[in-house]
Image: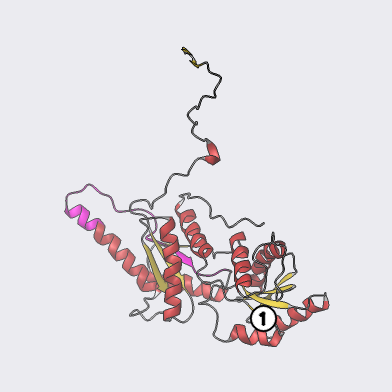
Amino acid sequence: MSSPTGPVSGLPVRMPRPRQPGRHRRPEPLAAPEGAPAFVLAVPGTPSAVVRSLAEEVVSIARSELPGMDARIGYLDGDDAEFPTLQSVLTRAAEERTARFEQARAAGMDVREPDGPVAVVVPLLAGPDSALLRRVRQAVMDSRVAAELTDVLGPHPLLAEALHVRLSEAGLARADRARLFTVATAADGIILASVGGDEAVQAAGITGMLLAARLAVPVMAAALDEEGAIAATAEQLRSSGSQQLALAPYLIGPELEPGLLDAAAKEAGCSTAEALGAYPAIGKLALAKYTTALGIAPQQPQGAPVR
């Protein structure tokens, strides 16, 4: 027997779950706006199959976060055949946008020539490097294409996460602070190696503070391209009590001169982790630079929680 308001048996009544408001709701999927500028990843360093694979992986990560995005890769030292130069990529993007506009108008569509930049250029650099950024800027100017150049990817907490992962992969840091065991080869002092002068060292130092908080060990930034800087920093860490040091490159990879990292590690007498490479955060941060330039707002890239 039941009443107009429901069962009277005393059993609980299952009610429909209300929609979750605010931050608990699933975010709406985001796609690239129609006619949006091209995303152009500016890749420094000497092109190679390894560099191309890394750049393509970064672009793939970015594209997966923003479907429909026109994503391209331009090399600072490309040859316009196997490795297209940044200048030629920008020129091609401008030509293709003009062609699409003319085809639409020829088809009788009432369209206006797009406003805004043809492309947004994102340098594949973790930190500032004035010499490389000057070359990127010059390539954009030489293309005579309306393109917007973004800042470099760091400093950012996600880069501290990436550095932590690379150190743990090399057996130089614990992967999880919540675990009670320790890694026998874990470093008790980290040298964060950058290239690009004093500005790059300062920027690396900001991410270094975040890394130090994750690992609970001292972290000091030093210039990989300044003779003796890595060794001097190693000596400073040892004099303050650290004995087992590790070198963590605050670099993505293509901008690193071959042999420079190994030579510095040997000089400082310490082990080294791999460069950041195509860690997922790199693609997400590159996309964030692009979307910020366009004024569209996907979810901010989030890293794994520190336990």
Whether residue 194 is in magenta: the answer is no
Q: How many labels does the image show?
A: 1
Q: Which residue occupies the foreground of this view, 293 or 27?
A: 27
Q: Which residue occupies the foreground of this view, 268 or 20?
A: 20
Q: Give me the residue at 46% from left, 67% from top.
A: 58
Q: Which residue occupies the foreground of this view, 174 or 193?
A: 174
What colour scheme does the image use? secondary structure
Q: Quadrant of the C terminus?
A: bottom right
Give the residue furthest to the left.
107
Q: Give me the residue at 82% from left, 74% from top.
A: 240
Write down the quadrant of residue 38 in the picture. bottom left
239 vs 2: above or below: below
Place of residue 67 in the rendered image (x, y in percent of width and height, measured from the top left): 38, 55
Residue 23 seen by the camera: yes
Q: Give me the residue at 56% from left, 55% from top.
A: 302
Q: Mark 1 points at which residue?
A: 271
Whether residue 103 is in magenta: the answer is yes
- Residue span colored magenta: 101-126
Secondary structure of residue under mark 1: strand
Place of residue 198 in the rendered image (x, y in percent of width and height, measured from the top left): 66, 73
Place of residue 11 in the rendered image (x, y in percent of width and height, measured from the top left): 54, 23
Write down the quadrant of residue 59 in the picture. bottom left
Residue 77 seen by the camera: no
Q: Give me the residue at 72% from left, 83% from top.
A: 231
Q: What amino acid type is highlighted by mark number 1?
A: Ser
